[in-house]
Amino acid sequence: MKTIKAQLSVGLVCLVLGLMLTLQFRNVQNYGGILSVQRAQELASELKDARVQRDSLQQRVKEYESRILQYEESAAEVSVIAEGMRQDLERARLLAGLTDTGGPGVVVTLAEVQPDQEFNVFYIHYDKLLKVLNELNAAGAEAVSINEQRVIATTEIRLAGSHININYQRFAPPFVFKAIGDPQTLEAALKLKGGIVEELEYYGISVSIKKEQDVFVPRYSKVLEFKYAEPVNK
């Protein structure tokens, strides 16, 4: 009897242990399954967020690339406009006589036949200088200087005592004109029959005309100031 009871007791204990182990295994398996499902859901959510962020970043990259392209096109347009403005400014400075100028033209020298005698304003009067200047301008001179004084819109050529003033500076012969333009045309205009050269020679003034391919005309050296004149916008 004792042996049977002992065997029954051992069998009962084994049964209980088996049930406990079975329940524990099922609990662990169920818990692990729950964890796996939750983790998979978390990973799926993170993947979805990552894809959304990726799409957003790709869209921003496209926007930035589009902006860069627009900036490059705008920069090119600005560069073209700036270059045009620079060229316009250079032309304006050239027309105003505010820049040194060079090119083909003529060098005209007026001197008295007897250079050792004292200067007499009645030999080379200021009006004769004006006539030479007018002939050069009429023949298409693009820049003119007299004794290295650039002739501009405000340049005066007038009698001042026993000298002639040009740009508020006093000069005596010889008077050297430098004019940039077509050399043939400029020379022909001065040498017209009955023109300024014949008139000057009639009064005993020596006239020398040299055609050159590299005439240098300096810029106007003084400061231009306007107190009353103002630009008018229409």
Image: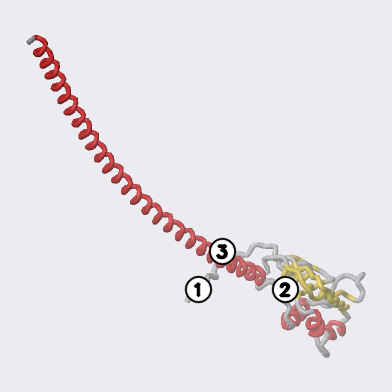
- Helix, strand or loop status at disc 2: strand
Could you tell me how many numbered marks the image carries?
A: 3
Q: For the residues carrying marks 2 and 1, which lies nearer the camera in this image?
A: 2
Q: Nearer the viewer, residue 188 or 230?
A: 188
Residue at point 21% right, 33% down? Answer: 31
Residue at point 72% right, 73% down? Answer: 143
Q: Which mark is residue 232?
A: 1
Q: Quick one: label 2 or label 1, which is nearer the N terminus? A: 2
Q: Is residue 17 above or below residue 171?
A: above
Q: Quadrant of residue 67?
A: bottom left
The amino acid type found where label 2 is placed reads Ala
Q: Whole-Å distance between the Cαs marked 2 and 3? A: 30 Å
> Residue 206, percent across and down?
88, 78
Q: For the N terminus, which image quadrant? A: top left
Q: Quadrant of residue 160?
A: bottom right
* Horizontal relation, residue 44 to residue 155: left or right: left
Q: Which residue is mark 2?
A: 143
- Helix, strand or loop status at disc 3: helix
Q: Nearer the viewer, residue 81 or 141?
A: 81
- Helix, strand or loop status at disc 1: loop
Q: Quick one: label 1 or label 3, which is nearer the N terminus? A: 3
Q: Which mark is residue 79?
A: 3
How dense is the environment of label 3, judged by Cα within 10 Å: few (below 14), some, or many (20 and up)?
few
How dense is the environment of label 2, judged by Cα within 10 Å: few (below 14), some, or many (20 and up)?
many
Residue contact at pointers 2 and 3, CB within 8 angstroms: no
The amino acid type found where label 1 is placed reads Val
Q: Quick one: label 2 or label 3, which is nearer the N terminus? A: 3
Q: For the residues carrying marks 1 and 3, which lies nearer the camera in this image?
A: 3
Q: Whole-Å distance between the Cαs marked 1 and 3? A: 28 Å
